[in-house]
Image (spheres, grey):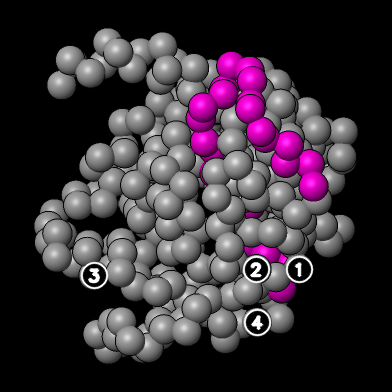
Amino acid sequence: MPRIAPLVAAAVLALPACSAVAGGGPPDPSAAPPPSADASAPAAPGEGGSGDGTGETAAPEGPLAGTTVVIDPGHNGGNEDAPDRIGELVEAGHGRKACDTVGAETDAGYPEHAFNWDLSRRLRDHLEEQGAEVVLTRESDEGVGPCITERAQIGNEARADAAISVHADGGPSSGRGFHVIAPGVLEGYTDDIAERSYQLALHLREGFEEGTGQPRADYIAEDGLDKRTDLGGLNLSDVPKVFLEAGNMSNSEDAARMADAEWREKAAEAVAAGISGYLQEQQDGAAGQADAG
Ligand SMILES: [Zn+2]
C-alpha cells in the first residue's frame, strides 16, 4: 500500500477548494478566488447555519447541549447548470476528484439534491431540539457546490463532534435499501477518525433501521455498512464523519418513500436518534477512554 507523506496532506488541506487548479499541474496556492457565495459563510457555532430563522440556540438545553453536529446535504440544485465549476478537479485525499456532482434522481424526476436538502433541514431541527449546535454545509438548494473539500473543511472548522453527509443512491433499479459509509483507514488522512466514524456509522445504522423500517441495502455494502477511501468528503475530514445513503432512487419502492414528506420526517427523526446515541455514548465514555490509549 502506498504511503501518503504528511507533507502531501498538509498541501492538500491548504488547497482553496473548487477554484484551484483543474489540470494536471501542481497545486498553486496563489490562484484562489474564494469559492461560491452560498458556501462562503460556514456558520459559527451558535448561528445554527440556518437561513430561515429557526436556529434559536442561545443557552441550549437537552441531552446534546454542548455538542456540535455538521450536516452536509449532498450535491446542490445549481450543480446541473454549472458543469465546468463542479467538474473542476480537487485533491480528495486519494487522488483528484470532481469538486462536486449532480447526484441521482427518481424515475419521476425527484432530484437527490432536493431530498438531501429537505431531510437535512428536518434533521437539523431534531438535533437542535435536543440541544445540539448544528451547522449546514450549504444554505439553500439553489446554489452550486460547495466542493467536497470545502464540505469537509466546514466540519473541521466547526470542530464537529459528528458530521454526516446526507445522500440517496442511484443504483440498479432492482436493488433497494439504505447503507452507511464510514471512512476506511487512509494513513495521514483518516487514521485518526476511522474508529470513531465507524462507531457513528453503527449508531446511525441502528437508528435509521429502527426508525424507518428501511431495509439494509441488498445491492451494495455489507449489512448496510461500507468503508471507503475514495470519498474526499470523508478523507479530508478531521472529525468523525459518515455518509448516509438513505435509499436507492432508481428503485420504485425506495423512490416512493423518499418522495414522501411524511417518510422524510420519520427518516430525519431516525437519523437524529442514531447521531444522538453516538454523541451520548461519547460523552458518557469520554472520561474512561482518556486512559485507554
Ligand atoms: Zn449523492
Label 4 with label 3: CB-CB less than 8 Å: no
The image quadrant where one finds the N terminus is: bottom left
Residue 182 appears anywhere in the view: no
Q: Residue at x 41, y 84 (%)?
A: 32
Q: Position of residue 12 (x, y in %)?
A: 28, 68
Kindly identify the amino acid type of the residue bearing the numbered disc 2: Asp
Q: Earlier in the sequence, mark 2 or mark 4?
A: 2
Q: Which residue is mark 1?
A: 142
Q: Residue furthest front?
A: 59
Residue 246 falls left or right of residue 181: right
Residue 6 falls left or right of residue 24: left
Label 2 with label 4: CB-CB less than 8 Å: no
The image quadrant where one finds the C terminus is: top left
Q: Which residue is mark 3?
A: 11
> Which label was assigned to residue 38?
2
Q: Residues within 10 Å of mark 1 (few under 14, many from 20)?
A: some
Measure the C-alpha gap from mark 4 to mark 3: 27 Å
Kindly identify the amino acid type of the residue bearing the numbered disc 3: Ala
- Cβ(mark 1) to ligand 1 < 8 Å? no
Q: Position of residue 76 (x, y in %)?
A: 67, 64
Q: Earlier in the sequence, mark 3 or mark 2?
A: 3
Measure the C-alpha gap from mark 2 to mark 4: 14 Å
* Residue interval drawn in magenta: 53-78
Q: In which image quadrant can residue 200 be found?
A: top left
Q: Is residue 105 magenta?
A: no
Q: Earlier in the sequence, mark 3 or mark 1?
A: 3
Nearest-to-viewer mark from 2 and 4: 2
> Which label was assigned to residue 82?
4
Which residue is nearer to you in this view: 144 or 135? Answer: 135
Query: Tag count in the figure?
Result: 4
Q: Give the answer, above or below, for where 5 lies relative to 266.
A: below
Kindly identify the amino acid type of the residue bearing the numbered disc 4: Ala
